[in-house]
Amino acid sequence: MADWPPLPEDAIEEKFLAATGPGGQNVNKVATAVQIRLDVFALGLSPHAYVRLKVLAGSRWTNDGEIVLTARSNRTQEANRAEARERLAELVAKAHIVQARRVKTRPSKNAKAKRVNSKVIRGEVKKGRGKVALD
């Protein structure tokens, strides 16, 4: 994400939840998991980046045009918060990468002829495997 500016704070909304996972009895007392929401429209993305982000986000994309990520793998709120923000920034950065267009290629006449010839040869080999006729 080195080339892209940081995500605007006004586009991000965080909510802390009670988490499952590491933390022992502390898990039951402290809301360490973080659910982060990013308002995609506030980013002002290009149409290409918007479509690509929607595909990359998949089921994390809501009908309201938000991306919802949850981080709960760490024991502390701050570590989960940092992880969620990092994952979100990576997702947005990936959306900006323009993939090279695939150039369609066709097999040459010679390649087609070779393939047909090899099929014919293989067919001849298989034909020779038939039952032996006793005359």
Image (spheres, rainbow, N blue to C red):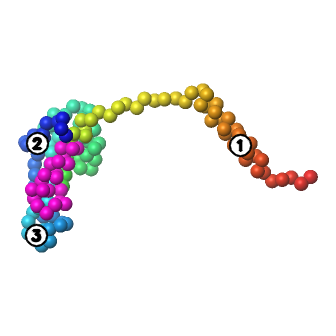
Judged by its main secondary structure, the magenta piece is helix
Q: Secondary structure at mark 1?
A: helix
Estimate how packed mark 2 is, as few (under 14), some (14 to 19) or many (20 or more) residues with alpha carbons within 10 Å: some
Residue 11 is labelled as 2
Name the front one of labels 1 and 2: 1
Three-letter residue code for mark 1: Gly
Q: Nearer the viewer, residue 10 or 99?
A: 99
Assess whether mark 2 and mark 1 are in contact (beta carbons under 8 angstroms). Answer: no
> What amino acid is found at the position of numbered circle 2 in the picture?
Ala
Single out the residue that lies furthest toward the bottom.
25
Tag 3 residue: 26
Give the residue at x 17% y 36%.
Answer: 4
55 or 80, which lies in front?
Answer: 80
Q: x%, y% of residue 133? A: 86, 52
3D distance between C-alphas at marks 1 and 2: 65 Å
What's drawn in magenta, residue-wise? Answer: 71-91
Q: Earlier in the sequence, mark 3 or mark 1?
A: 3
- Mark 3 or mark 2: whose residue is earlier in sequence: 2
Marks 3 and 1, Cα distance to the nearest angstrom?
71 Å
* In front: label 3 or label 2: 3
SS state under label 3: helix
- Farthest residue, direction right: 135
The numbered disc on residue 57 is: none
Residue 40: x and y, percent? 17, 40
Looking at the image, can residue 96 be seen? yes
- Residue found 61% across the figure and 28% down from its top: 110
**SS class, disc 2:** helix
State whether residue 119 is above or below residue 18. above
The Cα–Cα distance between marks 3 and 2, rounded to whole angstroms, is 31 Å
Quarter assignment of residue 80 = bottom left
